[in-house]
């Protein structure tokens, strides 16, 4: 897989997890466990992107 494409995918997943947590909390309040799970997936993807960048 192309390195530039992989970076875009990881950043898009990180952004999508943050936006989805916000939207789901507006529509129907989530449990804190569900919110933490979604945000941790996004944070892991952003961290992988930064680690591969160096």
Image: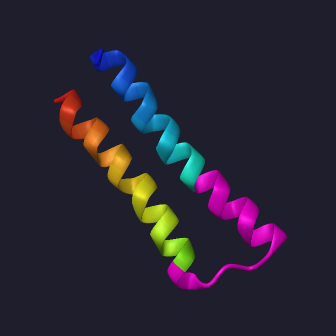
* Up/down of 22 relative to 51, above or below: below
Main secondary structure found in the magenta portion: helix
> How far across and down, in percent of the image, does residue 46 sit?
37, 45
Residue at the far front: name it: 1
Q: Which residues are magenta?
A: 18-33
Asked if residue 27 lies in the magenta stretch, the reply is yes
Point out residue 31 in the picture as x, y percentages from the top left corner. 62, 84
Residue drawn at x 56%, y 83% is: 32
Looking at the picture, how far across and down is residue 42, in whole percent? 45, 53
Viewer-side residue, 8 vs 1: 1
Q: Is residue 39 left or right of residue 49?
A: right
Q: Residue at x 67, y 79 (%)?
A: 30
| Numbered-mark total | 0
Q: Quadrant of the N terminus?
A: top left
x and y percentages locating residue 38 in the rendered image: 51, 64
- The extreme left residue here reads 54
Q: Is residue 49 magenta?
A: no
Task: Say which residue appears at 29% left-offset and 47% top-offset.
Answer: 47
């Amino acid at each position: 897989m192309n390195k530039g494409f992989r970076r875009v995918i990881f950043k898009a997943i990180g952004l999508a997890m943050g936006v989805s947590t916000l939207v789901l909390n507006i529509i129907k309040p989530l449990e804190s466990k569900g919110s933490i799970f979604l945000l941790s997936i996004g944070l892991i993807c952003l961290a992988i992107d930064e680690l591969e960048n160096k």
